[in-house]
Image (cartoon, rainbow, N blue to C red):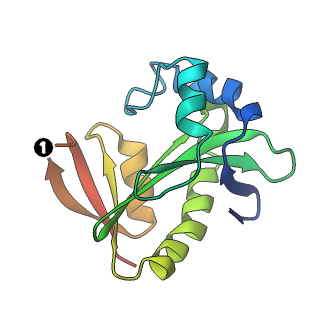
Amino acid sequence: MFETDRCILRCFEEKDLDEFMIYRNDDQWMKYQSFKNLTKEEYRKALLVPLNIERGIQLAIVNKGTDKLLGDMYLVKKEKTVAIGYSINPIYSRQGYISEVLKALLPKLKACYPDCTIIAGVEKENIPSKNLLLKLGFIYDGWIDEWQEEVYIYSN
């Protein structure tokens, strides 16, 4: 879909599933995530599908040089909102990959969906994710009971 200096954001492929399962099924690492602890077949049915942003899309973040799965990005458009979510394999955490991808993705989302507000939901205890969003120009907008998350709005 697009490239950054170190990453490619693309559709999931069969070869990504085993690596995806390693970090997504790690309860300690994924404590702030909801899409976890599924079987390979359940992930296959959810990830290897035609893309439709209105239904929600999960994209692979891969190393540009090795095509190794680093993490994933979730996008869903509902009415006048585009919601984003992201995860990284813990062995690649704190290396700037998610920040790099979001810095490239956010302007593209604004250009493709100019009438939409870009938001991200974060659990209260997920301090690293909240700090990342603030660094990227999101602002805190409040708590949503339905999601049981804090909501941040992209303000750039």
Q: Residue furthest right?
A: 65
Please rate how many residues cluster around mark 1, counting C-alpha atoms within 10 Å: few if below 14, some from 14 to 19, many from 20: few
Residue 34: give x, y in percent of width and height.
37, 31
Task: Name the residue rendered at 76%, 64% in the picture.
Answer: 5
Residue type marked 1 = Asp
Name the residue rendered at 16%, 49% in the picture.
144
Task: Work out whether residue 146 or residue 65 is closer to the camera in this orientation and state it.
Answer: 146
Q: Quadrant of residue 51?
A: bottom right
Residue 114 image point, x, y percent: 40, 82
Q: Residue at x 50, y 56 (%)?
A: 52
**Label 1 element class:** loop
Q: Residue at x 39, y 26 (%)?
A: 31
Farthest front residue in view: 50
Q: Residue 93, relative to residue 43: is it above or below? A: below
- Asked which quadrant contains residue 33, the reply is top left
Pick the residue in front: 18 or 64: 18
Q: Is residue 156 left or right of residue 92?
A: left
Check disc 1 and report the residue beneath it.
145
- At which x and y percent is residue 79? 28, 67
The C terminus lies in quadrant: bottom left
Relative to 79, residue 147 above or below = above
Q: Is residue 100 above or below residue 27?
A: below
Is residue 98 rendered to the left or right of residue 115? right
Residue 56 horizontal side relative to residue 22, left or right: left
Q: Is residue 123 left or right of residue 65?
A: left
Image quadrant for the N terminus?
bottom right
